[in-house]
Image: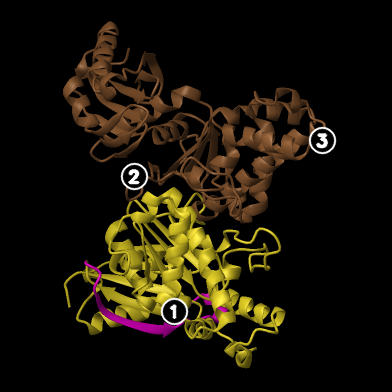
Chain colours: A yellow, B brown
């Protein structure tokens, strides 16, 4: 293994993904741990440190070979100080993550939120192709995002930037969102939102025959995109609506930020061209022509590795 | 005068505003020239250089006392090279502005577009209060904008960032915009758009009495805001609509960029609280609570000086 590596840890509510990466972002080693949620995640820093130092040793490396440790985690935090105000999925509240990890590992630590490190990973080594202006959106159970401008992640004034899932798309009568408001992009373009829209369409249009009826109650976004590919009218109607809204919203942000590339990740992005083609069409219709011409819309490439790659970028650029 | 100054020139289609500023952004001297539009603006660099060098001499200064010249101008350009692809109001096409100005003045020159230098000026010494994350919008004949993130202006991949005037707000049946598309924010919130909305309301609601009827054909945005303050029902309806749309759009961008301050400038902003209060209300309704809490919406403070102050910032930070 190389003599200097970047250490990375992407902490989630279920597992911690760890990695050792080269200075150019190649993954040299990677592994996972189940997240120790006991005592509101109190022991996570020690758990993580133990595993990391052990793995270094097995690779014939010591702390002196590690440039630093980049960490992604969910929740609301002060990135400058690596201080987590609240991470509901883990149990942390006012948790000095950076301080605790530096003590436990003896390494320099830099912390950012999980959506941002995933965006940085895709920007650096994924579909973003190392472009300095890049918008990333993740369509999963919810909708998250990360904004990269002038080759750096945008945190905003209180670390909350990137909440593209809570842009309002249905201004009147939109579905209730987890954030407590109505009509957010997340209610339309998340996997959950797409399923809800199909369930609603099945109920309100009983006369339309649809292969989705046999799946009612167990519908998935994948099944809906698959049915749309088979020309199922009801599924097509849902996909048309979802992709039109997504393309429209992305165009609004492109008009103001003029990104080189927009990367769409998360489970829903697995639909590939069935998602991307109509999104690109709606985007082109709503963006200024010169803006649309200079912006690609791509499917994310790194999957679950995006987080650790972004953590390594943070070490490379900021430690 | 101080021994080292920042030179600034904000070039418009009618006049060139020039200034000498201190390193802390105080205006030490300022003056204007009528823009020499002869021969498609061919002589502007020499005109500008002559006036600037003359003024320096009158202040007892030479080139050696000038840190550099910051320039703002309208049009589509490559900021990195100060090369203007097209500036319709001036006549330039493929005009190497930076190169020509450096030759004519003997100074280091940095060029950006007029909306961006105005935004930088407001950020530095105006309502932006030197905050590192700041969104500026100008409501004039059209609607322009500038986005400041991580203490730098956002250019985007092809220099087109900031086009908040061309965000679509009326998705079906919106008025035709100068950009060729329909329903842009500019068709609703520019001075022109506000007047159009009032003229339309006067036509479609002949039964509503309104003091604006006597002004039909000579309406201004100012008259409409004034009438709204006097409880004119029709004027209030227009103002309610315009401010609701503007607050809504600003909230969408705040959700993604989490700015500390949003500065509203341009002629329409002179309406002051009659504009700001309902915009803030609509903004708070549509933004995530933590985003809304951490963001102020303010009226621009520098008026026509914003451009030269922003030009000076460019010299200070980038030359």
- Distance CA(mark 1)–CA(mark 2): 32 Å
Question: Residue A268, relative to residue B88: is it above or below?
Answer: below
Q: Which residues are magenta?
A: A24-43
Co-location on one chain, circles 1 and 3:
no
Give the class, few, some or many, for how many residues have Cα within 10 Å of label 2's Cα (few <14, many ≥20). Answer: some
Q: CA distance from mark 1 to mark 3?
A: 53 Å
Residue name at image x 58 percent, y 90 percent: A211
Residue identified by numbered label 2: B159
Element type where label 3 sits in the image: loop
Label 3 to label 2, Cα distance in Å? 46 Å
Q: Which residue is the site of mark 3? A: B208
**Would you say residue B261 is visible in this rendering?**
yes
| Residue A36 belongs to magenta span | yes
> Closest to the observer: A234 or B63?
A234
Tell me: residue A45, above or below residue B206: below
Q: Sequence-wise, which precedes: disc 3 or disc 2?
A: 2
- Are the residues at dot 3 and dot 2 in contact (C-beta closer than 8 Å)? no
Of the two numbered discs 3 and 2 in the rendering, the one whose residue sits closer to the viewer? 3
Same chain for the residues at labels 3 and 2, yes or no? yes
Q: Residue at x 42, y 79 (%)?
A: A270
Chain for numbered disc 3: B
| Labels 1 and 2 share a subunit | no
**Disc 1 element:** helix
Residue A90 seen in render:
no
In the image as oriented, which residue stretches furthest toward the bottom?
A214
Q: Which mark is residue A271?
A: 1
């Amino acid at each position: 293994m190389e003599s200097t590596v970047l250490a990375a840890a992407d902490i989630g509510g279920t597992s911690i993904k760890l990695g050792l990466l080269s200075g150019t972002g190649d993954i040299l080693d990677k592994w996972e741990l189940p997240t120790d949620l006991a005592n509101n995640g109190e022991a996570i820093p020690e758990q993580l440190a133990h595993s990391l130092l052990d793995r270094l040793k097995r690779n014939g490396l010591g702390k002196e070979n590690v440039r630093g440790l980049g960490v992604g985690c969910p929740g609301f935090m002060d990135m400058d100080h690596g201080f987590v105000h609240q991470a509901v999925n883990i149990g942390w509240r006012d948790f000095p993550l950076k301080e605790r990890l530096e003590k436990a590992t003896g390494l320099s630590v830099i912390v950012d939120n999980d959506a941002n490190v995933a965006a940085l990973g895709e920007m650096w080594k994924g579909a973003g192709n190392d472009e300095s202006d890049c918008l990333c959106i993740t369509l999963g159970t919810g909708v998250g995002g990360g904004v990269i401008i002038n080759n750096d992640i945008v945190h905003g004034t209180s670390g909350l930037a990137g909440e593209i899932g809570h842009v309002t798309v249905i201004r009147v009568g939109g579905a209730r969102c987890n954030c407590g408001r109505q009509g957010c992009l997340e209610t339309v373009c998340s996997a959950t939102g797409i399923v809800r829209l199909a369930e609603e369409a099945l109920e309100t249009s009983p006369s339309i025959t649809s292969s989705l009826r046999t799946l009612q109650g167990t519908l998935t976004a994948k099944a809906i995109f698959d049915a749309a590919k088979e020309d199922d009218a009801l599924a097509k109607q849902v996909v048309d609506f979802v992709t039109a809204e997504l393309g429209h919203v992305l165009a609004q942000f492109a008009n103001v930020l003029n990104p080189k590339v927009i990367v769409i990740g998360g489970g829903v992005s697995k639909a590939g061209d069935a998602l991307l083609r109509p999104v690109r069409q709606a985007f082109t219709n709503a963006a200024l022509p010169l803006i649309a011409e200079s912006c690609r819309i791509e499917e994310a490439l790194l999957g679950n590795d995006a987080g650790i790659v972004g953590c390594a970028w943070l070490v490379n650029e900021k430690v």
